[in-house]
Amino acid sequence: MAFRSSRWYSGNDRNSYIHRAWMRRGLPREAFEGGKPHIAIANTASDLTPCNSHLNEVAGSVANGVWEAGGVPLNLPVVSLGETNVRPTAMLWRNLAAMATEEMLRANPIDGVVLLGGCDKTIPSLLMAAASVDLPAVVMPGGPMLTGHFRGAPLGCGTDVWRLSEEVRAGTLSREAFLRSESSMIRSRGHCNTMGTASTMACMAEALGMTIPGTAGTPAPDSRLLERSHETGRLAVDLVLQGRRPSQVMTRASFLNAIVTLAAVGGSTNAVVHLLAVAGRLGVDLTLDDFDRTGAGVPLLVDLQPAGRHLMDDLFRAGGLAAVLKEVEDLLDPQAITVTGRPLVEHLAGAEIWDESVIRRRSDPLLPDAGIAVLRGNLAPGGAVIKPAAASPELLRHRGRAVVFDSIEDVYARLDSPDLDIDETSVLVLRGCGPKGYPGMPEVGNLPLPARLLEKGVRDMVRISDARMSGTAYGTVVLHAAPEAAAGGPLAKVRTGDPIVLDVAARRLDVDLPDAELAARQPVTIGHARPVRGWERLYVEHVTQADRGADLDFLVGSSGDHVGRESH
Ligand code: FES
Ligand code: MG
C-alpha cells in the first residue's frame, strides 16, 4: 500500500533525500521506506490552556499505540485555546485554530491524525480542520477533572462560579468564603467537570463516531484514559490501512445522532454553533431547524450540572455515555458508523446504568423534552436558541418590558444603578455581542441580575442576546439571535420599554410592535467592533452568522489532502 507520506519520502532524488534526512534523527531508515503509516498527533497541550496541560502524557500513550500497530507517531503542536484566559473570547480564535491546523495537516507528510483536545474550543477546531482535510482521523478527548469539594459539597466548574458569585451579590455568601472556594474548584488535571462545552463536545465527538466508543467522559486522571489513548493510537494506524475518512464517519445520520445525544445529556448550547460549523466543512446539509426537529421529544436523562446536580466523574461511574445512549437507542440512526467501522449502536450492547440517580431511565426522565428550542420572530428572523433544560419552566412563556444594553460594559455600568427602572418581569436585552459585533460572540448571554432583585430572592429572568453563554451556565436565556445587531439584525432597533414576548412552546420571540414602527426605526450601532487589521479584520469581514456556525465564509467546505507542489 502506497501511503500519502511516501510522496515525500520514497525515491532516490534530491527532494526525497531532503525529506528523509531531516526527519531521521534517530528514527530507523525503514520508518521512511513506505510500509508504515505516519500518524500526526495534533496536540493542543499548552500551559496556557490549563484544561489541556496534561495532553503531552496522553500523546505519549497515543504514540506507543501507533508504534505498536506498526505506524510512526509524530507530535504536532497546534493552536490551543484556553477558555478562561483567551481574550476577548476563545470563540474569536476557533476558526483561526481550525484554519492553522487544517493547513498543517495538509502541508505535512502524514497519513492520518489523532486529535487531542479538551477545553471548549479545542475539539471543535480540530474536527473542523480534520473535516476540511479529510485525512483518516480520530479524536482522543483529554477528559474531565475529578470533583472538588467545598464545605463538604461538590463544586461544579463554572456553574458554581456563576452561582456563588450571585450569592455574594445577593448578600447570602461572604466574599471571604467565596474566595476560599477558589482553591477547591479545580481538583485535578482535566477540563470542566460539569456538562459544559468541553464535556459536551467530547460527547458530540463520540456520538458523531469520531472517538473509540466508550472514550468520552473518561476522567483525565483515570489510568483508563491512558489505556484508551494507547488503543486510539493503534486505531489511527488501522484507519489509514482501511482508508476510513472523516467524511465517511461524520454523515448527516451521525449529526442527527449527535443532536439526540445533546438533548439526552443536557449539553451546551455552544454545540449548536460547533456542529453547524463542522457540518459546513463536510458539505453535510445541517440546519438550525434540525436541532429543533430531531431534539424534540428527546428526554433529559443525565442529572449533571448545569441542568441538574452531578458531575462528570459521576456520569462515568454510573455507566458513561454508552449507558445514556442505550436508553435512547431507538432514536439513533443504526447506519451511522464510527471510526471502528461499525455502527455506533452496535457498541452499546454491553452498556448498563449503575446509578439511576445520575443516569435516569427513559421511563423516568428529568425532563421529557430536552432538545434545544429554535425560536423565530421579528427579533430573530434567522433564529435564536434556548436550552429548556437550564431554564425556569414558568418563564418559558413570558411578556415583559425590555431593558436594553448596548454592550456588556454597559451592563456592568448600569445594572446596579438605582436609576435603572427594572423589576423581575423585565426582559434584559443585550446586543452588539454577536460574531461581528464583539467580535467573536462571547459567552456573556447569561448576564447577571440586578443585586436588588437578587436580594429579593429573584434567581432568574428572561435574557435575550446575540451572544453565546458558557455551557456551564443556566437560566432562561435566549442566545445566538440572528442576524446579530452588528449585521443589521432587529435587536439593534429594540428600545427600553418595548414589550417583548417569549413563547418557547410556540417557538416565538417577538417585540410586540407594528412592523411599520420597527421598519422606521434607525438601528443603534454603539459599541460594534471595527477592527482595521489582522485576524480580527479578516474575521469581521468574513464570519457567518450563528445559524451557519459562525465559520468564515471562505473556510466552509473542504480542500482534501492534496498538495500538488514540492517545496524545493
Ligand atoms: Fe477549559 Fe472549562 S475552562 S473546559
Ligand atoms: Mg466556555
Image: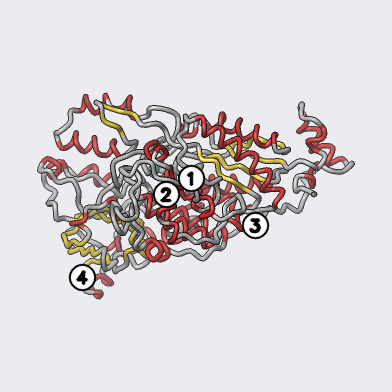
Q: Earlier in the sequence, mark 4 or mark 2?
A: 2
Q: Secondary structure at mark 2?
A: loop
Q: CA distance from mark 2 to mark 3?
A: 25 Å
Q: Secondary structure at mark 1?
A: helix
Q: CA distance from mark 1 to mark 4?
A: 38 Å
Instruction: Tell me, yes or no, if residue 465 can be seen here.
Output: no
Amino acid type at mark 1: Trp
Q: Which mark is residue 440?
A: 2
Q: CA distance from mark 2 to mark 1?
A: 8 Å
Answer with the quadrant where ligand 1 appears in the image.
Answer: top left
Q: Which residue is mark 3?
A: 559
Q: Which residue is mark 4?
A: 513
Amino acid type at mark 4: Leu
Quarter of the figure with residue 381: bottom left
Q: Earlier in the sequence, mark 1 or mark 3?
A: 1
Residue located farthest toward the right when viewing the structure as drawn: 12
Q: Say above or below: 333 vs 311.
A: below
